Amino acid sequence: MFRFAHPEYLFLLLLIPVLIAVFIYTGIQKRRNFKLFGSQELLAQLMPNVSYIRPQVKFYLQLAAIVLIIIVLAQPQFGTKVETVKREGIEVMIALDVSNSMLAQDIQPSRLDKSKQVLSKLVDGMTDDKVGLIVFAGDAYTQLPITVDYVSAKMFFSSISPQLVPRQGTAIGSAIDLAIKSFGTKGEAGRAIIVITDGENHEDDAIGAAKLAAENNIAVHVIGMGKPDGAPIPVPGTMSFWKDKEGNVVVSKLNEQMCKDIAAAGKGIYVRADNTNAAFRVINNELDKLAKSDLKSSMFSDYNEQFQSFALLALLILILDFFVFERKNKRLSRFKIFDLKDKVIKN
């Protein structure tokens, strides 16, 4: 398994296109300035040692070295040893509603952002438990298979948006069905499904799916996002709200009764989220009541550092860059590589 020990440094790669753009812009400005002094043929005779291609070669060599140094900072590693780790915990599948109605802001900063905060707190409170994530709107998709890799789980949380599911709607039943199938081989560990939604189910039989989960000894807890009074749904990237066919602003309301019915059918509890952490505490207490059992999982326990090869390559490129002069060098004039390219560019 390949990984970066410090992937946050990879964000520095965003500087590369900026540097390229600045270099291209600077080159264009230089050529414009040269034209102000006269014809290029005349200037070429007056400045015989000026090279057009060498500065570009030096720039891209330096750029390659920067990329390699960033990779070195990110610390690439290869997993070399797999161990079966025994943990004593429970299994939890989280089904998160990502329909457009979750963008409503009747709880701050929005229903969806508040859901992410609750998810992060739930994962932070886990030690030896397994957790998985399903996102749903009109369809349901497994975003994160059940795992003990909490770091990856939290990385997935940050990227959640309504764009993850192409078809809009609220298929809670499909999400619960998929969650049931996502658990591993049945064992003694307690299992639970946590549905985070505003309850506007228009697609399927969510109550029937919750009953099926209960029959398989899987509790279905529901966290209601929003308020019964509701709120308009912002259109991303604009200052307006979603409207119906008649041009009226759509107000999305928390369907609290639907949420309660799903929780009751799944032999779980229902709690409404607000601007406090009350919902998290209630759900966390319910999870603590579940029976814990040995959970086996395979994990890489030993990693070999791979940054040395990238660092060596960066050093070789910098050494090469040191011997590439921006101007033509008389001692190296017998090597016609750059001169030939200069002639091609001039022509």
Image: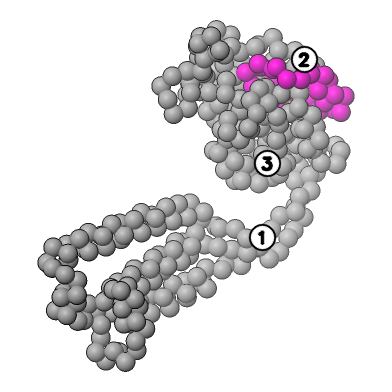
Q: Which residues are magenta?
A: 193-222
Mark 3 or 2 closer to N-term?
A: 3
Residue found 24% across the figure and 79% down from its top? 327
Task: Give me the C-alpha separation between circle 3 and circle 2.
Answer: 26 Å
Position of residue 121 relative to residue 151, above or below, is above
Please state which of the two labelled residues, at mark 2 or mark 1, is closer to the viewer.
Answer: 1
Residue found 68% across the figure and 41% down from its top? 144
Residue at disc 1, secondary structure = loop
Task: Give me the C-alpha separation between circle 2 and circle 1.
Answer: 43 Å
Task: Give me the C-alpha separation between circle 3 and circle 1.
Answer: 17 Å
Disc number at residue 1? 1
Q: Position of residue 267 (x, y in %)?
A: 79, 19
Q: Quadrant of residue 190?
A: top right
Q: Which residue is mark 3?
A: 144
Q: Which residue is mark 2?
A: 264
Mark 2 or 1 closer to N-term?
A: 1
Give, as a three-letter code, the residue at label 3.
Leu
Q: Position of residue 188 (x, y in %)?
A: 85, 37
